[in-house]
Image (spheres, grey):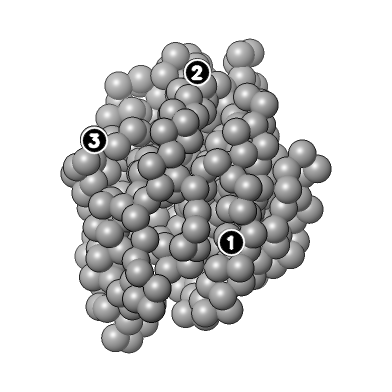
């Protein structure tokens, strides 16, 4: 099977796209054309794929990336059996002649947009309805795969779920240390960036540092740069997933301090599974998905959500400090939490167990290639 995979929003080394799905396709003997912003992200494509380089869609400047994506998708689909796209944006650039097409829904984009302070101005109100319209059209015309069961409420059409499981080492990782916290994943306001900065500030007198590993939304980058200049934390930016998880090993705890946002509430965040897989205790806010995984396995602590916007990090930071110091002062407890988390991740979240089902689903769709209907020439998707 020849598969064309496309993104202009995500990093080319995105863990879900590159390390899980594309790797699973290659391991199954399929050919992959990968459309992604390699040059923009300073990434060298792996030799086993056919790479098509496009600009990255960043902030409000997306027209150039969409134009390039339209040409790249037409080229990539020319001999493909299946097209797999990972961005809502790419629904505006799909070629008229294309193979069976699949949209991978990573998250509840509309709810997350409504929760973030970005983009500013009128677009902040206009984008969620546009995204909702594109999602409805995609559900009628394309195949969908969902990253979590919680997305079924938004996409009720019985679509298969391909969860963001991770690679779990068979051998237990080293035990947690006592002087370093870690966060792995995208940084944004809704994902607790401000709260983590405040936590780092309060832990500085105790000699506990914070490592942030991941790309950041435009609205929080100045905050992170200022905190790094003040010596409160180390922000490494995007790091390939395999290396990021090696960096995380041995931390006192992994943080998942998301706000109470509908689009982030019910899913188990990939970072929580990754912390568990690497034997790191988890400190999380009480989002049902994350809290359920942590309390069910006995592998971490749950703290309150941040307060209202005018109390940026207040009460939650106090609770987080207490949780961190409790774990620091009890090596046996944090080692037991790390071991339980690793065992549970190996039982429930090991990606190689799920990968064959993902590949088989794409193979079934490619063998039954009813091509998705397209709009007649001259008509466009709503914009």
The x and y percentages for residue 91 are: 42, 62
Within 10 Å of disc 3 (Cα), the crowding (few <14, some 14-19, many 20+) is few
For label 2, the SS is helix
Please state which of the two labelled residues, at mark 3 or mark 2, is closer to the viewer.
3
The x and y percentages for residue 37 are: 65, 62
Residue at numbered disc 2: 353
Question: Which badge, 3 or 2, is on the more N-terminal residue?
Answer: 3
Residue at numbered disc 3: 158
Within 10 Å of disc 2 (Cα), the crowding (few <14, some 14-19, many 20+) is some
Q: Which residue is drawn at 55% across and 21% down?
A: 352
| Disc 1 to disc 2, C-alpha distance | 33 Å
Q: Which of 322 and 370 is in front in this view?
A: 370
For label 3, the SS is loop
The tag on residue 74 is: 1
The x and y percentages for residue 194 are: 42, 63
Q: Which residue is drawn at 50% across and 18% down?
A: 353
Q: Which residue is drawn at 29% across and 37% down?
A: 159
Within 10 Å of disc 1 (Cα), the crowding (few <14, some 14-19, many 20+) is some
Instruction: State whether residue 31 appears in this view.
Output: yes
Which quarter of the figure has residue 357? Answer: top left
Which quarter of the figure has residue 175? Answer: top right
For label 1, the SS is helix
């Amino acid at each position: 099977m020849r598969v064309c995979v496309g993104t202009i929003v995500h990093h080319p080394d995105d863990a879900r796209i590159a390390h899980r799905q594309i790797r699973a396709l290659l391991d199954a003997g399929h050919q992959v054309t990968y459309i992604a912003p390699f040059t923009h992200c300073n990434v060298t494509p792996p030799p086993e794929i056919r790479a098509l380089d496009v600009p990255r869609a960043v902030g409000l400047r997306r027209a150039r990336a969409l134009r390039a994506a339209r040409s790249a998708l037409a080229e990539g689909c020319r001999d493909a059996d299946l097209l797999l796209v990972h961005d809502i944006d790419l629904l505006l650039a799909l070629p008229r002649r294309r193979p069976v097409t699949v949209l991978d829904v990573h998250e509840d984009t509309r709810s997350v947009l409504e929760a973030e302070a970005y983009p500013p101005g009128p677009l902040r109100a206009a984008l969620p309805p546009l995204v909702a319209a594109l999602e409805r059209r995609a559900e009628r015309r394309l195949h969908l795969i969902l990253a979590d069961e919680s997305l079924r409420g938004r996409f009720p059409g019985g679509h298969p779920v391909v969860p963001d499981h991770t690679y779990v080492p068979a051998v237990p990782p080293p035990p947690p240390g006592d002087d370093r916290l870690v966060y792995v994943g995208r940084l944004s306001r809704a994902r607790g960036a401000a709260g983590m900065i405040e936590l780092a500030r309060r832990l500085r007198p105790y000699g506990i540092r914070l490592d942030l590993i991941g790309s950041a939304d435009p609205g929080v980058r100045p905050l992170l740069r200022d905190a790094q200049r003040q010596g409160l934390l180390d922000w490494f930016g995007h790091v390939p997933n395999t290396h990021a998880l090696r960096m995380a090993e041995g931390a006192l705890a992994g943080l998942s301090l998301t706000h109470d946002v509908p689009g982030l509430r019910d899913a188990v965040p990939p970072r929580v599974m990754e912390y568990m897989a690497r034997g790191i205790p988890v400190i999380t806010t009480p989002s049902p998905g994350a809290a359920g995984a942590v309390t069910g396995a006995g592998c971490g602590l749950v703290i309150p959500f941040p307060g209202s916007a005018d109390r940026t990090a207040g009460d939650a930071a106090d609770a987080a400090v207490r949780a961190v110091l409790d774990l620091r002062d009890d090596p046996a407890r944090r080692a037991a939490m790390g071991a339980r988390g690793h065992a549970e991740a190996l039982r429930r979240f090991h990606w190689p167990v799920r990968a064959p089902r993902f590949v088989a689903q794409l193979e079934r769709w490619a063998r039954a290639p009813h091509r998705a209907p397209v709009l007649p020439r001259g008509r466009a998707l709503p914009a």
